[in-house]
Image (cartoon, rainbow, N blue to C red):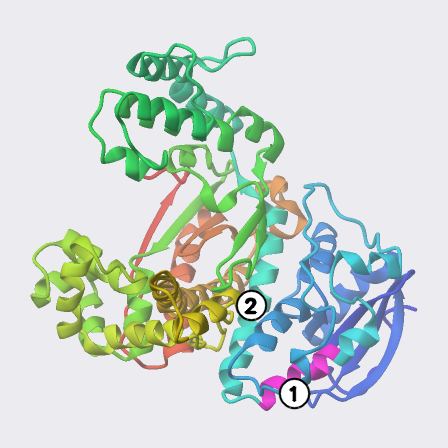
Amino acid sequence: MTSTVPVTGVPAWIVLGRTVAGAAVAYLDPGGMEQRRHEVAASELADWIAHAEAEWAPRWVWHDTPQWYPALLAHGVRIARCHDLRLCHVILRASALVDPHAPVRTAAGWDAAPHVTLEAAAPTLFDFEGPADAAKGPPADLDDALAEFTRQRDAIAGGAEPGRLRLLTAAESAGALVAAEMQAAGLPWDAAAHDRILTETLGERGTGGQPANLAASAARVRAALGDPTASLDSQPKLLRALHRVGVLVESTSRWELAEQRHPVIEPLLEYKKLSRLLSANGWAWLAEWVDDGRFRPVFVPGGVVTGRWASSGGGALQLPRQLREAVRADPGFTLVVADVAQLEPRVLAAMSGDLTLAGAARDRDLYAGIVESGAVATRSEAKIAILGAMYGATTGESGRLVPRLRRTYPRAMGLVDDAARTGEDGGLVSTWLGRTCPPPSEVWAEAQSRASEADATGADETRARRWARDRGRFTRNFVVQGTAAEWALAWLADLRTRLDAIPPVPAERSAPRSGPVFARRPHLAFFLHDEVIVHTPVEHAEAAAQAVKDAADTAGRILFGDFPMDFRLDVRTAITAFKD
């Protein structure tokens, strides 16, 4: 059928389900009641969705954004809002704000992994082959989608904090749209600059061997070890070689090696640094992940239990700063790069309602504000102390400094201390909007139970205490890191809307490699926890930078109302993302 099917009133939601021939569609009114349904052929679907988007601006409900949206973007169709059933199910089935007996907690199939698009080539509408494809992800049938949407709406409405859950699910779904859009547009990447950086850093490539500088570094390590055949890329063999020369480390981690004093340490650290660059982002990575001036990583929203994003291809969340010079805008475009200063400590101040800590952050570097409060003497001490409080460090410099923060900022420190105690006792903690941490494992619970028995050994008790402390450190950080992820999602969602409102430039000044949706307008090109990169026509750079700032202000108000927290941004505009 075509897009001419009549609808009574304006649908608030349009639910999509897969069919062998295309898609089944259901229209829901603002109360969630179904108005009618019909089918759309695959060949007509993109145009039909574009028409419905322009006509009604609904919230699209579908089972998994990566299975729907990339194909639409490839056809030049952008949507404003969606409800991603898979992502929202993961949140709601585990949230402590949802009724324990809510049917959403036991609905089968919706915990499946996302179906990510790994290829840069335009996906087709649609390559779905029928029921056998269900193994790729959550149920895709329209009736399944409608049933799950009803369960989710009921869970939110009947939850302890419906407003927070609605905001969280909306933000998570918006993040899914952003992730698909950033992959479609790609991050502008200068392959020649990348190659030059690799050659300058690693040395010229040999014929089948290591690059010159890496080979020279390896030779220095082997000379210091007195072993010209030492294996440097096998940790067990390298550890044995280090032990033979008196470097008695338990691992080859950079942190442990840096504490040692021996002639092998300096060249070994250099070798490890160069080797990692070659393996993670060397010439093989360049050939695989950069095509036609774009790096198109695969972002996975909600890929970490705290709600932070992960990456399932390209290593987008671990790009080394030395390659930032290769991130280069297209002709006529520039980059607006912004990151939030001390996001997690600022979020901690806001969610705990600690006005004293918020005051330390107002219009300035938060760590400098902590020094001015007299809690610690130097900025480095302030950073060590606040990170120690959020991550549960109890020894060394952090152990000495954290008690000072408790005296100066009792509300903020009380929040993370309470979260740690809850975790140590096996309890659950939640973020500001209601994402809840996973429960302890059965093995963990058995260890705690065993330690309380009359015949428990000292080893049993030691293990139980250690595991309890480990879980306390996890829950202590979960509430802060997860809430920071929620703030970042709100930032992205609002920024995405603001950028779309900026008028496009004429076609002759476009950047066609950004795809049909984003070639002529400012758009998000990269996101990393507390940082965004916007690729924008030069004439819109100022407007894009202002949009970044305004979106940050909006995110703070959406989450924390009128609490006086300043989310301080470092915003800069440049042709490359390089920053000293």
User: What kind of secondary structure does the magenta stretch mostly adopt?
Assistant: helix
User: Looking at the picture, which amino acid does disc 1 mark?
Assistant: Asp
Report which residue position mark 1 lands on.
154
User: Do callouts 2 and 1 mark residues in contact (Cβ within 8 Å)?
Assistant: no
Please check the rendered image and state whether residue 33 is part of the magenta-colored stretch, yes or no. no
Badge 1: residue crowd in 10 Å (few <14, some 14–19, many ≥20) = some
Badge 2: residue crowd in 10 Å (few <14, some 14–19, many ≥20) = many
- The disc at residue 172 is 2
Name the residue located 29 percent from the left edge and 15 percent from the top edge. 224
Name the residue located 55 percent from the left edge and 49 percent from the top edge. 311
Name the residue located 57 percent from the left edge and 58 percent from the top edge. 178
In the shown orientation, is residue 416 left or right of residue 281? left
Q: Is residue 505 visible?
A: no
In terms of sequence position, does the residue under pointer 2 or pointer 1 come before the other?
A: 1
For this orientation, the residue located farthest to the front is 455
Q: Is residue 554 above or below residue 292?
A: below
Q: In which quarter of the image is residue 143?
A: bottom right
- Tag 1 secondary structure: helix
Q: Give the range drawn in magenta.
A: 148-158
Q: Nearer the viewer, mark 2 or mark 1?
A: 1
The percent coordinates of residue 363 (x first, y second) are 21, 65
Please check the rendered image and state whether residue 156 is part of the magenta-colored stretch, yes or no. yes
Q: Which quarter of the figure is the N terminus placed in?
A: bottom right
The percent coordinates of residue 22 (x first, y second) are 87, 61
The percent coordinates of residue 381 (x first, y second) are 15, 55
Spatial CA span between label 2 and label 1? 18 Å
In the shown orientation, is residue 377 left or right of residue 403? left
